[in-house]
Image (cartoon, rainbow, N blue to C red):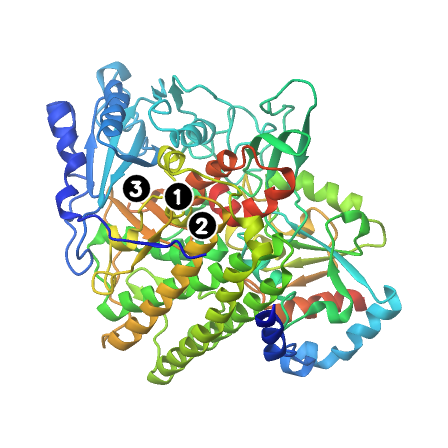
Amino acid sequence: MFRILHQIFRTGIVTEPLPLLAEAEIEEVGARLEDAIGRRFSKSLTIRMVDAGSCNGCELEIHAINNPIYNCERFGIHFTASPRFADMLLVTGPVSRNMEIALRRTYNAAPSPKLVVAVGDCGYNGGIFGESYASLGGVGKIIPVDVYVHGCPPKPADILSGILRAVKI
Amino acid sequence: MPEAVGAAHPTMKNNMTTLNNTIITAFGGDAKQDTNQYPIPPTPPFNKGGGRGDIAYQTPRERFAEIAKAMKVADARLVAEWTTDESLYPHPPLPHQGGRNKGRGFGIYACYAKDSEYLIVKTYTPLDDPTFPSITKKFISAYRFERQMRSLMGVVPVGHPDLRPWIKHEDWPEDAYPLRKSFDASKPLPRVAGEYQFIKAEGEGVYEIPVGPVHAGIIEPGHFRFQAVGEDIINLEEKLGYVHKGIEKRFEALSWQEGARLAGRVSGDTTVAHSLAYCRAVESMTGCNPPERALWLRALMLERERIANHLGDLGGICNDVAFAFLLYQFSILKEKLLRTNLKIFGHRFMMDSIIPGGVTVDISSDAKNEILSEMDWFTNEFERLATIYDENPSLEDRVRDAGILTPEKAKELGVVGFVARASGQNLDCRIQNPFSPYNIIVPKTTVLQSGDVHARAWVRVEEIRESIRIIRAILYGLPKGEIAGKFTPPPPDKSGFAVIEGWRGEIVYWIQSGPKGEINRCMVRDSSSVNWIALEQAIHGNIVPDFPVCNKSFNQSYSGNDL
């Protein structure tokens, strides 16, 4: 127990202030994220993440925005298990044929108005997997997308920035 | 909770020809060594210190299963089984083809391994009679391989007990076989009506829990069907294939260089190991030897990838038993390592850093010192957390004796990687099939016997410690020189093979060049393809609420399995 308490004190607060996250866009509009979430989503933005066929690289970076350094919860952003509670869907991957129906169902299960952020180059146009019998291409071909976040995979700060852009729309 | 048994690996030299001798003794002239596709003998330093699967035997179709039986008797492990469409290769028409040229038909391949020896057995089946004798009754791991071969290539394993589709979902047209050359991959597939028949359990109080494909967390999709009585799981059946993106077919449309990028995206968390396995398979076809410095840098990246993923998993295991403190602590460490990767290699996961012939990034002496001092700092921090994990009774209560995969089952299923090492199997390609520098810096494996969640966690703890040591040794000994050699594309009609110990375990690539020197087939076998089924076995008798932590302790890739 003492070891745990000691480690907590040693660690302190590692969350970085927004300017340090530094990807230009976040810096520019950073402080307004909390403000926008505060006004538009009663201080709490709830996200359902859907992997529609990714290679799992994007999932690693979405995990990272939850770590203490990016700490997305400080803005009121948190992830939910049920699409019924979701304000936003964060979708990764080219949409695989075998996930198309599940993605549509998840979208339909989320209450309106719902925001959709497609994460990664594959979510934009299918990336290196392209369009084929098994890969239907970008997320926008299946459900309406509000914001695309580019990168393979996008860095955590870019994902936060994409969420911000969607909230501001 | 120390119970680590430092295992000495068996001496390889004595065992290097066991399988080869078995084949020669039992099958004589019926098994012909195929020297056509494998003309290039492994040469140092490309293959210092170990044998490789460059020996391939061609056998008549009717003896394919007999060889499997002999391999089983010789105590071999089935590494992979796959099929090729070789109809594009010019070939004299066989008498029963009525004089029409149908190429070589479908190739059926099985790869066996024992210690450091890998051996490939192949046979052909004509296009108008695409059947072969199933080997599932000899090797359980063939169960899904053969279902997949039938689903995606339309070759029928005769005698297979379960011919439900695998990866191919129930709403695909039955005659859609994407890996056939006659299949147009660019067209979307129509949907047809169909239902997947799950295994049913009946009896008083038995109920079913369907989970997925969209899971609760930030995780890839797959479907789990539990049969339970009260909280006790009596059966679990996995249905995967949701993230099937047609990767193997996609390879066939890419150049040799682009193939490395695609391999790096088979499973994003294993990008280094997959692109490395691809490149080594391609290099084995051309005899291309990357410069020594490139080989060492590849190993450096491989070990950094191993540490980062093991940290994520250890945090995930702790979180799944409600000990979020360690999840956050481990994720801080992981984030810092990824930032160093970004600074030094230009990418947080070092994607696309490995290319055929070498690597794309060199490290300066400043970068070298930075990694060395990072390792000092990291060791200190990591050891604090490992102690906290080790001394926490409430954690121990949940991870001990949960999700046991017995050593007998592990061997029978042919699992690999940390799953195998936590269940008594001493397998590590870095030792059994080393490339430079692993022949000099030999990793010490940790093999545990208990096969539970704790064992799979503790193997990772020990492997992180070992990777730190290897990284230091690589940096101290890093040879000078170029980081990439000249790469020439492979000649037509050759095959290449490589195995790499990724952080999840053995990754296998088998690549065949077509009649025009293009990629005719790229077979990818991620560790997940053999390890997923072990989760079904390990979960028996556990309670439903323990499933998440059991699953996390395996943490297999959906994308790597579904391709």
Label 1 belongs to which residue?
A: B423
Asked if residue A3 is positioned above or below residue B153 in the image, the reply reads below
* Earlier sequence position, callout 2 versus callout 3: 2
Secondary structure under tag 2 reads: helix
Mark 2 is on which residue type? Answer: Ala
From mark 2 to mark 3, how far is it between C-alphas?
A: 44 Å
Identified by mark 1, the residue type is: Ser
Which one is in front in this view, the residue at disc 2 or the one at disc 3?
A: 2
Q: Are marks 1 and 2 on the same chain?
A: yes
Q: How far, Cα to Cα, is label 1 from label 2?
A: 8 Å
For residue B455, the mark is 2
Q: Along the line of sight, which residue is nearer the eye, B504 or A21? A: B504
Identify the residue at horizontal 47%, vertical 42% (top origin): B561
N-terminal of the pair, mark 1 or mark 2, is 1
Image x and y of residue A130, in percent = 54, 50
Q: Write down the residue under mark 3.
A: B514
- Looking at the rendered image, the disc whose residue lies closer to the viewer, 1 or 3, is 1
